[in-house]
Image: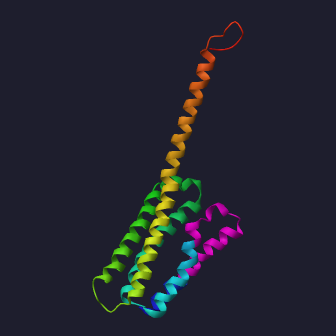
Amino acid sequence: MVHVCWWYYFSKFTEFMDTIFFVLRKKNEHISTLHVIHHGCMPMSVWFGVKFTPGGHSTFFGLLNTFVHIIMYSYYLLSAIGPQMQRFLWWKKYLTSLQMAQFVAIMVHAFQLLFIDCNYPKAFVWWIGMHAVMFFFLFKEFYNQSYNGAKRRAAAKLALNGKTAEWERRIRTAKRTPMGRRT
């Protein structure tokens, strides 16, 4: 199991390469706070777990995270194939929801050890649990900006367009006074 944990640790560096490729390709719009924090701190965070508590309780979040990443990178593969795949990519929003559910499961799994004694170091309980809390809120903010924010922007634009259209209609239908002004 320790050997597998080390491979998981090395996978965090390949994920960090994602950020480097964005920088090299000047795709700065893809580099968010979430992206930098997630890919920047995970190699260090996973190293502590692999070095001091490999196997056992520590493997849960890695196993779950690997499962989510398989689904996530499958999505990226399909989207990279081209526009003809767009009709198959309706599930992006659900992928973000899956990531948030992953962090809830990791929180529950970690924080249960605050109430159950199994000789797992409490410092790592807090380390894993608080990482899950932080990532949950970062992904929640991403979800709100990406999915709820788009709806709010569209609604605001519609409202603005509606007010503008109403104002223009009033100007067109207003009667002119003898001085040429509209009423």
Above or below, 96 relative to 102: above
Q: Can residue 66 be seen in this view?
A: no
Q: How many marks?
A: 0
Question: Which region is colored magenta?
Answer: 11-36
Q: Is 152 on the left-hand or right-hand side of 23?
A: left
Closer-to-camera residue (172/23): 172
Instruction: Specify the quadrant of the image occupied by residue 14.
Output: bottom right
Q: Residue furthest top?
A: 178
Residue shown at 47% from the left, 90% from the top:
50
Q: Could you say where residue 102 lies in the image, as x and y percent from the top left? A: 40, 70
Is residue 81 magenta-colored? no
Q: Nearer the viewer, residue 150 or 124?
A: 124
Residue visible at 38% across and 87% down in the picture: 122
Q: Would you place residue 13 above or below residue 173 in this image?
A: below
Q: Does the magenta portion include 12?
A: yes
Q: In this view, does 141 lie to the left or right of 119?
A: right
Q: Which of 48 and 167 is in front in this view?
A: 167
Q: Can residue 106 be seen in this view?
A: yes
Q: Residue at x 27, y 85 (%)?
A: 116
From what the image shows, is residue 99 above or below residue 7?
above
Q: Point out residue 24 in the picture as x, y percentages from the top left corner.
A: 71, 70
Q: Residue at x 59, y 25 (%)?
A: 167
